[in-house]
Image (cartoon, grey):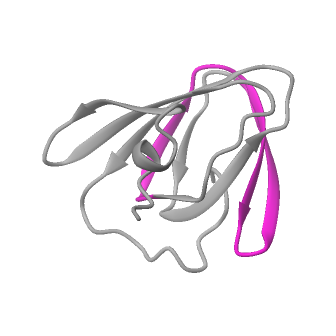
Amino acid sequence: MTADPADTNPDLYRVVFENERVRVLEYLDRPGDRTAPHRHPDSVMVTISSFSRRISAGGREVRVDLPAGQVRWLSAQEHSGENVGTTPTHSIFVELKEPGGAVAGAALGPE
């Protein structure tokens, strides 16, 4: 089974662009929606809407509250998430295809 978010959560993630160097995903959910565990390579995340999420990985959990219009670096990581807020989450991920850092020990959520 793949840990690609477009495969593990096709109702929430959608590939909107891809070439040999990057892949761009759009993410849309509603309050209470959860993602299955999945993996992101090094990415840039752009928040279209403000959101509150709980991100879980390796027995750790962090809450992430971000306003709309933020641009954040996201180190390669594997996690699952849940919309714990009162508004939908809408964000864009620009995933880099070049080799990056290891997943183990990466910070959870956006840096």
93 inside magenta stretch: no
What is the span of residues highlighted in magenta in the rendered image?
40-67
Residue 55 highlighted magenta (yes or no): yes
The vertical placement of 67 against 74, above or below, is above
Question: Dividing the image into 4 quarters, which one contains the C terminus?
Answer: bottom right
Q: Is residue 30 left or right of residue 72?
A: right
Instruction: Judge whether 103 appears above or below 77 on screen.
Output: below
| Main secondary-structure element of the magenta-colored stretch | strand
Left or right position of 60 against 99: right
Q: Give the farthest residue toward the front.
A: 1
Give the residue at x 71% y 21%. Answer: 88
Q: Is the residue 64 above or below the residue 14 in the image?
A: below
Q: Quadrant of residue 37?
A: bottom right
Image-quadrant location for residue 26? top left
x and y percent of residue 87 in the render? 79, 19
| Location of residue 18 with respect to 101 vertically, above or below | above
Describe residue 65's horizontal placement relative to residue 101 as left or right. right
Q: Give left or right: position of 16 versus 67.
A: left
- The residue that appears at 41% across and 59% down in the rendered structure is 41
Residue 103 image point, x, y percent: 50, 73
- Residue shown at 63%/50% (left/top)? 110
Q: Position of residue 106 (x, y in %)?
A: 59, 71
Query: Where, quadrant-wise, is the N terminus in this rendering?
Result: bottom left
Q: Position of residue 67 (x, y in %)?
A: 73, 26
